[in-house]
Image: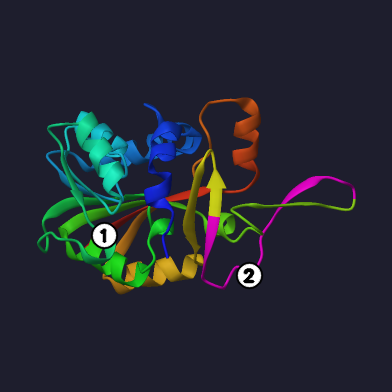
Amino acid sequence: MTDGWDESAQAWIASQGDEGDFGRRYVLDGPMTARVAALGTPLRALDVGCGEGRFCRILQGLGVATVGVDPTVALIERARALDPGGDYRVGRAEALDVADGEFDLVVSYLSLIDIPDIRAAIPEMARVLKPGGTLLIANSTSFNTAGLGEGLGKSYDVSGRFRYAIDAYLEERAYWTAWKGIRIINHHRPLETYMSLLLGAGLTLTWFAEPAPTGGNPATVDRYRRAPWFHVMAWRKG
């Protein structure tokens, strides 16, 4: 069964544009780049699930040497077109074709929810880190992915006030989500699943945040403040 990414690649490229969507531009880019800058340079980074290469290009602007990996051929082709000198490879997070300890930094920027076999992927990300290296993760919160229907559920209380709703939080599952011509499979997992796998890979949590929006349309800002849409984590190897 297809996960929808091949069919949705062009719509994804159009939706991101040059600056990324609201969540990336106004919520996640700031804390992600600040954390990378705090690590100092030089750094060699692997972006797992790099898509069209947007965050690789941002990292390069910070002086970081990057390799981007993604399973969707059309997205890798777009990344190469936008960054002809960059290193972009077709590959899967579950079986990274790179050597042990090759990178100072591994990035998963909203890619964990797209990965079917997370129990293989997280140990792979840890494997390719150097001792003392950092795994930097931006992920949709499990409150988000446990929503009724697709993404954050919608409900109304007895007074008619709009509420977000979640259901079956402890049950891991795949679900279809669709917006702006994109239709892909995402994966809900409770936070315990991610934390247990990261700890089991021998990593140490050094930073955690649930960032709020820093700009953008006020109505969208209000929606993103109603519930924690994302969290950001830094994990150190060794």
> Which label lies toward us, 2 or 1?
1
- Residue 171 in the image, given as x and y percentages of width and height: 56, 73
Nearer to me, 90 or 148: 90
Instruction: Determine the residue positioned at 38% across, 43% down.
Output: 9
Is there CB contact under 8 Å for labels 2 and 1? Answer: no
Report the disc number at residue 19: none
Instruction: Determine the residue positioned at 18% across, 49% down.
Output: 89
Residue 163 drawn in magenta: yes
Secondary structure under tag 2 reads: loop
Q: Is residue 5 left or right of residue 212?
A: left
Q: Is residue 36 left or right of residue 64?
A: right
Secondary structure under tag 1 reads: loop
Which part of the image, by quadrant, shows the N terminus? bottom left
Look at label 1 and name its amino acid.
Arg
Q: Which residue is mark 2?
A: 168
> Which residue range is magenta in the image?
159-176
Check disc 1: other Cα within 10 Å, few if <14, some if 14-19, many if 20+: some
Q: Is residue 55 left or right of residue 66?
A: right
Q: Is 166 located above or below residue 20 in the figure?
A: below
Rendered image coloring scheme? rainbow
Report the disc number at residue 92: 1
- Residue 187 in the image, given as x and y percentages of width and height: 48, 62
Q: Is residue 76 visible?
A: yes
Instruction: Determine the residue positioned at 63% across, 26% down.
Output: 218
Give the distance between the C-alpha atoms of the residues marked 2 and 1, in whole angstroms.
28 Å
> Which badge, 2 or 1, comes first in the chain's sequence?
1
Check disc 2: other Cα within 10 Å, few if <14, some if 14-19, many if 20+: few
Q: Is residue 110 visible?
A: no
Residue 125 drawn in magenta: no
Look at label 2 and name its amino acid.
Ala
